[in-house]
Image: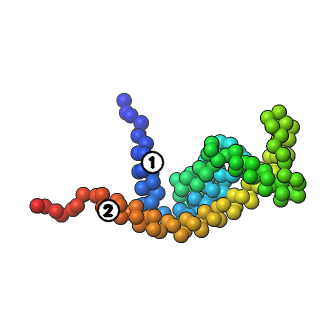
Amino acid sequence: MRRPPRWPGWRAAWRALAGGDHSNRNLAAALALGVLVAPTPVLGLHTWMAIGLAFACRVNRLAAFVGSNVANPLTMAPLVWLDIELGARLLGRPAPVWPGRAGIWAQLARLYLEAWVGALVLGVAAAAATYVLARLLLPGWRRRAQSAAVDSSPASGDAS
């Protein structure tokens, strides 16, 4: 009976991302796509949205996955609340007062619209910032990762 393939681990995934044949521009765009979808109020769909956009735009899917993980269990509530605040202001409405658990269901449709409007603006701004930062930081990060890989490889030609 054949064993299923093993996950190589996070370090190997990071090395593949750093040492892949994708350009810095491609990786920066993929990270930005992931960050673009991260603030959207669709719990559980961020990864699929980011990977789908990465396929459509022909950029690195692993980098898009990494970018989408800006939204995680620790950051999701503040991101959605920031979406709602921003969306309400952009729609010309007063910022909502948190209604508590019982009142949230009565206001859910309005809050969801505000969350989407805010998420679009926040996502575009965060994606633009991510793209610029990634374009600045990726070249040095990739050089360090590649030099570390060369330093850790066994010396060739040393026969003593």
x 58%, y 55%: residue: 67
Report x, y in % for residue 16: 43, 55
Q: Is residue 102 above or below residue 97?
A: above
Determine the image quadrant of residue 18: bottom left
* Quadrant in which the N terminus is drawn: top left
Left or right: 137 in relation to 115: left
Q: Would residue 55 be seen by someone viewing this image from the given angle?
A: no
- Does the CB distance between marks 1 and 2 fall below 8 Å? no
Left or right: 131 in relation to 147: right
x 16%, y 62%: residue: 158
Disc 1 crowd rating (10 Å Cα; few below 14, some 14-19, many 20+) is few
Residue type at mark 1 is: Trp
Report x, y in % for residue 140: 45, 68
> Which residue lies most toward the left here?
160
Q: Would residue 110 be seen by someone viewing this image from the given angle?
A: yes
Determine the image quadrant of residue 102: top right
Disc 2 crowd rating (10 Å Cα; few below 14, some 14-19, many 20+) is few
x 60%, y 65%: residue: 131
Which type of secondary structure does the marked residue at label 2 adopt?
Answer: helix
Q: Which mark is residue 10?
A: 1
For marks 1 and 2, give the CA distance.
Answer: 19 Å
> Which residue lies most toward the right here?
93
How is colour applied across the structure in the image?
rainbow
Determine the image quadrant of residue 160: bottom left
Left or right: 82 in relation to 89: left
| Residue corresponding to mark 2 | 150
x 45%, y 64%: residue: 141
Left or right: 150 in relation to 140: left
Residue type at mark 2 is: Val
Give 76 or 158, whichever is nearer the viewer. 76
Report x, y in % for residue 100: 81, 37
User: Reading the chain from its start, which is encountered first: label 1 or label 2?
Assistant: 1
